[in-house]
Image (spheres, grey):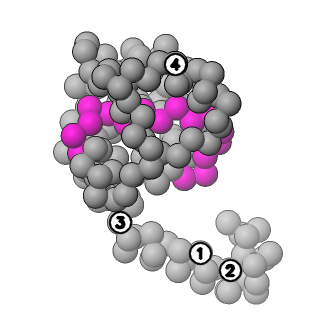
Amino acid sequence: CSKKLILAGIIQDQGYYDQYIAPRIDNDKAVYIGSVGPDERNRLLGRACALLHPIQFDEPFGLSVIESMACGTPVIAFDRGSMPELIENGKTGFLVGDGDDAVEAFARIKEIDRATCRRHVERHFTVERMVNEYIQVYEMILDAGGLESGLQKL
């Protein structure tokens, strides 16, 4: 499969980037474009085959994952942190264990329906739903008599 790999975003580990990534950037099949604004991000995600999200920590949410699926683009992510809560494995993307698994998942990316990705975000991650659920948590905390008591109830 001949695809272009576009890396966007900030470099969080310059040493790792310099040692492992930079030597592979050929500005043809693999390019690094740096941090992009919302319009360019949406354009890139909307045209992408997939978002590769090889997180190396237990990410608590993953906004880029939601942004990708909102554009109809499936996600291939390491199965850690919040990823199992965000991605429906085999329906909105693939949860993988390592880079080899990610390559195998990418070969199957056409199995994922882009409209299903979008609908998943519309059902679970709208502003209204998230605001309402935050309000419910705050009300539970207040009803329980404070933060510590409320958190114990969660």
**Would residue 75 be visible to someone looking at this image?**
no
Residue 30 locus on image (x, y percent): 37, 24
CA gap between label 3 and label 1 equals 17 Å
- Point out the image quarter for the C terminus: bottom right
CA gap between label 2 and label 1 equals 6 Å
Q: Nearer the viewer, residue 75 or 111?
A: 75
Residue 117 locus on image (x, y percent): 28, 45
User: Tag 2, which secondary structure?
Assistant: helix
The amino acid pointed to by label 3 is: Thr
CA gap between label 2 and label 3 equals 23 Å
- Magenta highlight on residue 47: yes
Q: Nearer the viewer, residue 31 or 91?
A: 31
- Magenta highlight on residue 58: yes
Residue 85 locus on image (x, y percent): 50, 46
Dot placed on the residue nearer the N-terminal end, 4 or 1:
4
- Residue occupied by mark 4: 23
| Residue 137: mark in rendering | 1
User: Tag 3, which secondary structure?
Assistant: loop
